[in-house]
Image: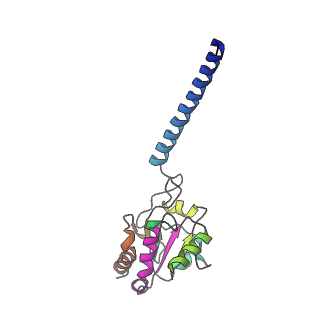
Amino acid sequence: MDRKEVATRGSAWRAFAARGAATIAAVIEGLYTAATRRERGAMALKPGDPAPEFSLAGSDGRTYRLADLVAGGPIAIAWFPKAFTGGCTVECASMGASGGELEKFRGQYFAASVDTPGANRRFAGSLGLEFPVLSDPSKATARAYGVLAPSGFARRWTFYIGRDGRVLDIDKQVNASTHGRDIARRLASLTS
C-alpha cells in the first residue's frame, strides 16, 4: 500500500468515525429528550378536572363514549402498556377475577391500551375477560389523559371518573396482581 492509498483510507476512516460519533451523540440526545420531556399537548389531569371525552372501540366490538358511560355511574379506566405482556396480563386477569366484586357497584370498569382493536379482542378472549378492553391505536386519548409515555405505550394508571364527567381520582401506583380488588375498594369508597 502506498502513501496516497494509506492517506485516502485514513481520511475515509476518520470520516466514518466522525459520522458514528455524531450518530451516537444524536441517539443519546434523543433518549435524554424522550426521558425528560412531557408529551406535547398533554396536560397533567388531577382530581376535579373534566375528563377528556373519547370514543374508543371495545374488545366486544362496541364503541364506547365517555359521555354515555358516566351516565350510568362512576367508571374506572385502567390503562396498561401492551396486550400479551407479563404485567398487563396479570393486571387484566386480576380485574377479570374480581368481576363479582366490581359488579356490585353501579359503575363500570374498563381496561385500555394503545393496541389495535384486533389485538385487544384476541387478548381479552385469551383471558376470558367479561369486561371491555378499549383500544386507542391513534394514541389521541392516551395523550389527552396524559398516560402516553415517551416509549409510545400507555403508562399503567387508572382513572376514576364521576357521573359529572370529572376525574375523581388517579391511581399512578398500580399493583398489577391486586388491581381488580384495588379498583373495587376504590369504587366502594367513591360511591359511599
Question: Which quarter of the rendered picture does the C terminus lie within?
Answer: bottom left
Q: Give coordinates of residue 30: x percent, y percent.
A: 52, 42
Residue 160 seen? no
Image quadrant holding the N terminus, namely: top right
User: Which residues, given as a range, are shown in magenta?
Assistant: 88-115
Question: Residue 150: x and y, percent?
Answer: 50, 52
Which sits in the foreground, 140 or 70?
140
In this view, the residue in front, 86 or 134, is 86
Residue at 62% from the left image edge and 24% from the top image edge: 12
118 or 68, which is in the foreground?
118
- Residue at 50 percent across and 61 percent down: it is 154
Residue found at the far top of this picture: 3
Q: Position of residue 141 (x, y in %)?
A: 55, 64
Taking the image as shown, residue 190 lies to the left or right of residue 7, namely left
Q: Nearer the viewer, residue 182 or 16?
A: 16
Q: Is residue 84 magenta?
A: no
Residue drawn at the location 45% of the way across and 48% of the way down: 35
Residue 119 position by quadrant:
bottom right
| Vertical order, 4 against 143 (above or below) | above
Q: Is residue 31 above or below residue 188?
A: above
Please determine whether, in this image, residue 37 is positioned above or below residue 185: above
- Asked if residue 107 is among those painted magenta in the image, a careful observer would answer yes
Q: Residue 44: x and y, percent?
A: 45, 58
Q: Is residue 59 above or below residue 40?
A: below
Rendering quarter of residue 170: bottom left
